[in-house]
């Protein structure tokens, strides 16, 4: 039987492969994060040179914002940001975003 602790270790190992990669972190709220993943901890992810964007305040939804970031780049507005793991619903590599 797999314990919760070993599941956490597997997740942290998989995410650790993305260190120094530009990622998109989608949250349960309208906020999306784009930046360089520099640390994976049990309780949070740490991004540097990050763009923290609340899609509710802009003219585009999350999907369109991420596609535009993939096509045209993004402008960081934080040197470093800590994202609580319990708020995260998905993590993707920015270069893996499909632009049609």
Image (cartoon, helix red, strand yellow):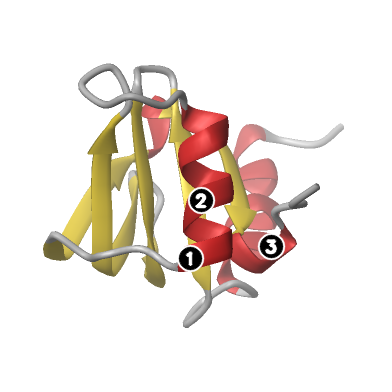
Q: Which residue is mark 2?
A: 68
Q: Left or right: where does residue 66 sit relative to residue 13?
A: left
Q: Earlier in the sequence, mark 3 or mark 2?
A: 3
Q: 70 above or below 19?
A: above
Res. 72 mark: 1
Question: Measured from the top left, where is residue 14 in percent x and y?
Answer: 69, 62
Percent x, y for residue 9?
Answer: 62, 55
Q: Quadrant of residue 12?
A: bottom right
Quadrant that contains the N terminus: top right
Foreground of the two, 74 or 27:
74
Which percent across, then down, holds residue 59? 33, 24
Label 1 with label 3: CB-CB less than 8 Å: no
> Residue 64: image x %, image y %?
54, 35
Give the mark toward the camera: 3 or 2. Answer: 2
User: Could you tell me which secondary element the residue under label 1 belongs to?
Assistant: helix
Disc 3 is placed on an element classified as: helix
* Circle nearer the viewer, 1 or 3: 1
The residue beneath circle 3 is 14
Compared to 96, does 26 lie above or below? above
């Amino acid at each position: 039987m797999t314990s919760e602790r070993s599941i956490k270790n597997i997740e942290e190992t998989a995410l650790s492969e993305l260190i120094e990669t530009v990622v998109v972190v989608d949250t349960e709220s309208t906020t999306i994060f784009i930046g360089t993943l520099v640390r994976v901890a049990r309780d949070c992810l740490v991004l540097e040179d990050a763009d923290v964007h609340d899609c509710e305040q802009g003219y585009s939804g999350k999907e369109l914002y991420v596609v535009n970031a993939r096509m045209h780049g993004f402008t960081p507005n934080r040197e470093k940001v800590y994202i609580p793991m319990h708020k995260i619903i998905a993590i993707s590599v920015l270069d893996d975003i499909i632009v049609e």
